[in-house]
């Protein structure tokens, strides 16, 4: 089970590297739907990781809660990515009929219904899972991985602030202090799962 999870996880990393090296070309060719489909496959490849890690560290029973939140986070990513991929592929094919209308629809769907808050909530849940893992690593004497987990868990604050910012109608300055860069967020997510794959291999 661990080996299968490891190889699936590596496949997810390979997909991410492929996305990183081709996303500009895909966007220029109006293939944003396919881009989101690739991201959906990437998150699917990482789905087993939270519970496989829990099974390896199950003497710390509280980690089950973290693994559950981590899995929910990945499921949310998968759902929102496949829905965005479906919408973008459909809208791109019909955009020639009324480009301005479909541009507004894309903005409404991606920044409203299918994106933004869903992805931020998924990131926030992932951050809580990372906190559980950091504590577990510390109790298990794996200090380096615990410190790395503490560092990655700092992104939880960013996700929470942006989630509140997008949910509230009233502008609150403190919620706009930290900008969200999609590239940084994607690098944070992929590097965290790569770190966990390294942990699975050496442990």
Image (cartoon, rainbow, N blue to C red):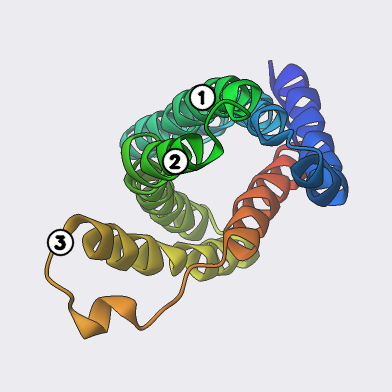
Tell me: 130 left or right of 195: left
Query: Where does the image place residue 123, in percent across and percent down from the top left?
Result: 43, 49
185 up-or-down from 112: above or below? below
Q: What element carries label 2?
A: helix
Nearest to N terminus: mark 2 or mark 3: 2
Image location (x, y in percent) of residue 110: 44, 41
Instruction: Report crowding for label 1: few under 14, some 14 to 19, many 20 or more residues within 10 A (C-alpha).
Output: some
Q: In the rendered image, which residue does mark 3 sit on?
A: 168
| N-term-proximal mark, 3 vs 1 | 1
Which quadrant would the N terminus be assigned to in this image?
Answer: top right
Question: Whole-Å distance between the Cαs marked 2 and 3?
Answer: 18 Å
Q: Nearer the viewer, residue 131 or 185?
A: 185
Question: Do the residues bearing badges 3 and 1 touch, measured as CB atoms within 8 Å?
Answer: no
Secondary element type, mark 3: loop
Reading the image, the residue beneath label 1 is 87
Q: In which quarter of the image is the C terminus?
A: top right
Residue hosting label 2: 110
Q: Are marks 2 and 3 in contact (CB under 8 Å)?
A: no
Horizontal side, residue 153 vs residue 20: left or right: left
Whether residue 48 appears in this view of the structure is no
Q: Residue at x 63, y 29 (%)?
A: 96
Question: Residue 160 or 109: which is nearer the viewer?
Answer: 109
Determine whether label 1 and label 2 are within 8 Å by CB.
yes
Q: Residue 135 carries which label?
A: none
């Amino acid at each position: 089970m661990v080996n299968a999870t490891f190889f699936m996880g590596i496949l997810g990393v390979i997909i991410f590297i492929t996305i990183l090296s081709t996303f500009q070309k895909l966007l220029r060719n109006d293939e944003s739907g396919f881009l989101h489909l690739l991201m959906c496959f990437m998150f699917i490849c990482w789905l087993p990781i939270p519970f496989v890690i829990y099974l390896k560290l199950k003497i710390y029973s509280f980690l089950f809660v973290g693994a559950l939140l981590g899995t929910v986070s990945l499921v949310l990513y998968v759902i929102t990515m496949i829905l965005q991929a479906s919408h973008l592929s459909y809208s791109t094919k019909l955009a020639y009929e009324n480009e301005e209308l479909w541009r507004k629809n894309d903005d409404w769907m991606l920044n409203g219904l299918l994106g933004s808050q869903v992805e931020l909530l998924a990131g926030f849940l992932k951050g809580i899972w990372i906190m559980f893992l950091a504590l577990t690593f510390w109790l298990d004497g794996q200090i380096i991985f615990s410190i790395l987990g503490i560092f990655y868990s700092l992104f939880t604050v960013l996700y929470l602030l942006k989630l509140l910012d997008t949910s509230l109608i009233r502008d609150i300055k403190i919620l706009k202090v930290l900008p969200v860069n999609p590239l940084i967020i994607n690098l944070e997510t992929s590097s965290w799962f790569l770190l966990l794959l390294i942990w699975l291999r050496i442990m």
